[in-house]
Amino acid sequence: MGVRILYRGTPPAEKLYNGTCLTCGTRIECQRGDGRFEPGSQHNLGETVRVPCPVCTGVIYASPKRVTFSFPIHGRD
Ligand SMILES: [Zn+2]
């Protein structure tokens, strides 16, 4: 028997980020490759992706979308 995936995680390149433009209020969803990835540091808590706003000239700092884990409450085996 090979490896079976019980829960598929999200590789960094597929991870979704979302953010709101502080200048015009546009909400976007993006991936790491769509902007400039900035790992979290002591000055900003958590990683962000900096993307130019597609509507105005603002900059959007997108944060990782919250990942929801769904494990079955009752096992099937
Ligand atoms: Zn904007």
Image (cartoon, helix red, strand yellow):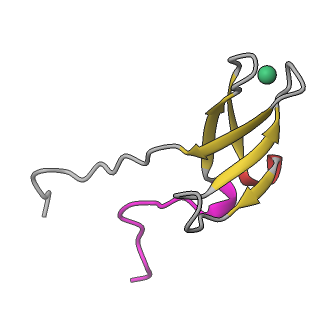
Classify 77 as above or below 33: below
Residue 6 located within the stretch drawn in magenta: yes
Left/right placement of residue 6 relative to residue 65 reads left
- Most extreme residue toward the left is 74
Residue at the image point whose x is 86% and y is 25% from the top: 54
Q: Relative to residue 71, is residue 5 drawn left or right?
A: right
> Which quadrant is the N terminus positioned in?
bottom left
Q: Position of residue 17 (x, y in %)?
A: 62, 43
Q: Is residue 16 left or right of residue 31?
A: left
Above-or-below relation of 11 to 59: below
Q: Nearer the viewer, residue 71 or 76?
A: 71
Q: Residue at 37% of width from left, 46% of height from top?
A: 68
Q: Magenta stretch: dominant SS?
A: loop
Give ligand 1's quarter of the image: top right
All told, the count of numbered labels is 0
Residue for point 76% across, 47% down: 50
Q: Viewed as shown, does residue 14 lie left or right of 70?
A: right
Q: Nearer the viewer, residue 16 or 38?
A: 38
Query: Dividing the picture into quarters, in which one does residue 12 lie?
Result: bottom right
Identify the image quadrant of residue 55.
top right
Where's residue 72, x and y in %? 19, 51
31 lies above or below 13: above
> What's the magenta region?
1-14
Please state which of residues 30 and 36 is positioned toward the viewer in this rendering.
36
- Along the line of sight, which residue is nearer the eye, 73 or 4? 73
The x and y percentages for residue 58 are: 83, 29
